[in-house]
Each structure stands twice: as C-alpha cells, then as structure tokens.
Image (tube, grey):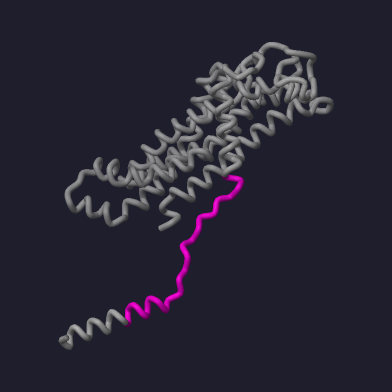
C-alpha cells in the first residue's frame, strides 16, 4: 500500500473517531399547544354548522317555538340555549348568524388580501414615487378611525350585506398593503432575485414568479387574524343597529336584542357573546400557528 493511501486511510479513521465522539443531539420537536387543536375543532364545528344549517334538525330562526326568554334547558335541541325575547330558538339563531358573520368576515378579508397584497408588492418592489403614493394612501386609511368609517358608510348607504362587505373590505386593505410591502422589500434583496435580474428577467416575471410565491404564505397566514377582527367589527355594527337588518340573525344583533333584559335573562347576551369570543380566539390561535409554520422570515 502506498504512502498516500495510508495517509488517506488514517485521515478517514480520525474523522470517524471524531464523529463518534461528538454528542448526539436529537432533532428539535415541534410542540403544538392544545389550544390550537381545540381552536381547530371549534372552527370546524361552527363552520360546519353554518354550512349545513338548512339540513340540521333546527327550528326556523324567525319562528317562535316557546315562551320568551326561556333559560337554557335540555327539554329539546331547540331550547338547548334558551329562547330570545320573541320566543325564537337561540341555538338556531346562533347557527344561522354564523352564516352572516363568517361569510362577511371571510369575504371582506379575502378582498383585502387580494387588493392589499397586489398594491403592497408593487410598492415594495418598485419603490420611490410608487411606494410613496401607495404608502401614503395606506397610512391615511389606517389613521382614519375604523368605527367612524363604518358608521359613516352605514348612515349614507342602506344597511345590507354589500354595504358591510364594502366597508370591512376597505378596512382590511391597508393592513395587507403594509405587510406585503414589508415582505416584498425583504425578498427583493435576496440572491435569487438579483440573479434573475442579471439574467435579464423583466419586472413582471420577478415580481410574480420569484417574489410572490414567497410573500403569499406569510400574508395568507395573517388572514385568520384579520377575519377575527372583521367579525368583531361586524358585530359592533350590528350591536349599534347598523348591521344586517332583521329578521336575519347576526351575533352582534342578538346581543343588541338582549341587552335590555341582561339583568333578568343574561343568557340572551352571554350566549352570542361567548360564541363571538370563542370564534375570534380560535381564529387568532390558528393564525399565530400558521404564521409560525409558514412565515419563512421567522425561520431565516
């Protein structure tokens, strides 16, 4: 055996012995909070109930089924959560109210996501005057009190689902503009973007083929948190009587209907309030979990 071969063999043995002497560190385990699983279960239940409300064995939400202000009891499924001031099933109204609150929150959040992400990426990529104009508009919209804007729209326009969607969509746009702009600025300085520019790729290709796939994940993970805020905003409008007109139920409207009887029948207020609380809490938990999982800037 030659001297070179012997030296290579000795080097390999030293590397193996060194590797064996190193402490073996187990791979980090990702811990998930029990609250995340409970939140997912709650969202599945409330969304499933809203989707299949018409086939569930529930009384119509606008038809009295018994004496007014009946407390929760186990006599029947319709009276499980009691009855409201007109004797209608609170359980039925909560389920059908979920259709309004969840659809409005999801659609308004999606509108804000699409429009805000588009303009935010343009501002972050092109910069200069384009960035200044878009950022100025976003800052102006964020500076305007949200509730005042919604009250102004509700007083000028006829209260309806379209009016609320329009107002809540406007509220969601500036938040996504700022998030998309910040993420685009971060990804625009990466090596693969500079390499694409050096290879002669156009701005459209770089923006939508290179940057957008990396920006959409953290923005989409922020969606549940925005939807939670929009559900609260819709409930506030309905509580003030400027939301969905009756007899269509909404969670905020149910709180408004029962506020005068809270001293004698607290379930009229606490049942829809707890539903809003659990839904908003679950959306925030899921949103934080998704952001931790898919926001690559946190891992980088």
- Which residue is outermost to the top? 63
Relative side of 7 to 226, left or right: left
Q: Position of residue 163 (x, y in %)?
A: 52, 21
Quadrant housing the C terminus: bottom left
Number of numbered discs overlaid on the protein picture: 0
- Residue at image position (52%, 43%) is 287
Q: Give residue 134's quadrant in the image.
A: top left
Furthest residue in direction right, as rendered? 264
Vertical comparison of 210 with 299: above or below = above
> Which is nearer the eye, 269 or 158?
269
Residue at image location 25% in from the left, 40% down from the top: 204
**Farthest front residue in view:** 1
Q: Is 105 located above or below residue 10 in the figure? A: above
294 w.r.t. 146: above or below:
below
Residue 167 pos. (x, y %): 51, 27
In this orientation, which residue lies closer to the viewer: 152 or 72?
72
- Residue at image position (77%, 21%) is 75
Residue 18 on the magenta span: yes
Rendering coords of residue 283 (x, y %): 56, 39
> From this viewpoint, which residue is outermost toward the bottom?
3
Residue 18 falls in image quadrant: bottom left
Magenta part of the chain: 14-36
Residue 269 in the image: state x and y as whole percent.
Answer: 73, 28
Q: Quadrant of residue 267?
A: top right
The N terminus lies in which quarter of the figure? bottom left
């Amino acid at each position: 055996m030659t001297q070179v071969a012997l030296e290579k063999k000795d080097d390999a043995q030293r590397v193996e012995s060194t590797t064996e002497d190193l402490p073996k560190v187990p791979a980090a385990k990702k811990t998930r909070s029990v609250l995340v699983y409970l939140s997912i279960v709650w969202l599945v239940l409330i969304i499933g109930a809203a989707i299949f409300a018409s086939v569930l064995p529930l009384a119509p939400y606008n038809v009295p089924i018994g004496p007014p202000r009946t407390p929760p009891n186990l006599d029947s499924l319709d009276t499980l959560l009691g009855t409201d001031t007109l004797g209608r099933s609170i359980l039925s109204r909560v389920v059908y109210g979920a259709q309004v609150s969840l659809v409005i929150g999801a659609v308004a959040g999606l509108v804000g996501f699409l429009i805000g992400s588009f303009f935010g990426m343009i501002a972050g990529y092109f910069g200069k005057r384009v960035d200044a104009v878009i950022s100025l508009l976003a800052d102006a919209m964020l500076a305007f009190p949200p509730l005042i804007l919604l009250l102004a729209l509700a007083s000028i326009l006829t209260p309806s689902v379209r009016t609320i969607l329009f107002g809540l969509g406007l509220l969601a746009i500036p938040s996504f503009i700022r998030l998309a702009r910040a993420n685009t600025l971060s990804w625009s300085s990466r090596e693969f973007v500079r390499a694409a520019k050096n290879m002669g790729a156009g701005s459209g290709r770089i923006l939508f083929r290179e940057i957008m796939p990396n920006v959409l994940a953290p923005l989409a993970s922020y969606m549940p948190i925005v939807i939670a805020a929009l559900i609260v905003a819709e409930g506030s409008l309905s509580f003030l009587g400027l939301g969905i007109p009756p007899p269509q139920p909404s969670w905020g409207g149910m709180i408004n209907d029962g506020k005068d009887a809270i001293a004698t029948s607290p379930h009229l207020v606490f049942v829809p309030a707890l539903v809003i609380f659990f839904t908003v809490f679950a959306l925030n938990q899921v949103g934080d979990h998704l952001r931790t999982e898919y926001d690559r800037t946190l891992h980088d």
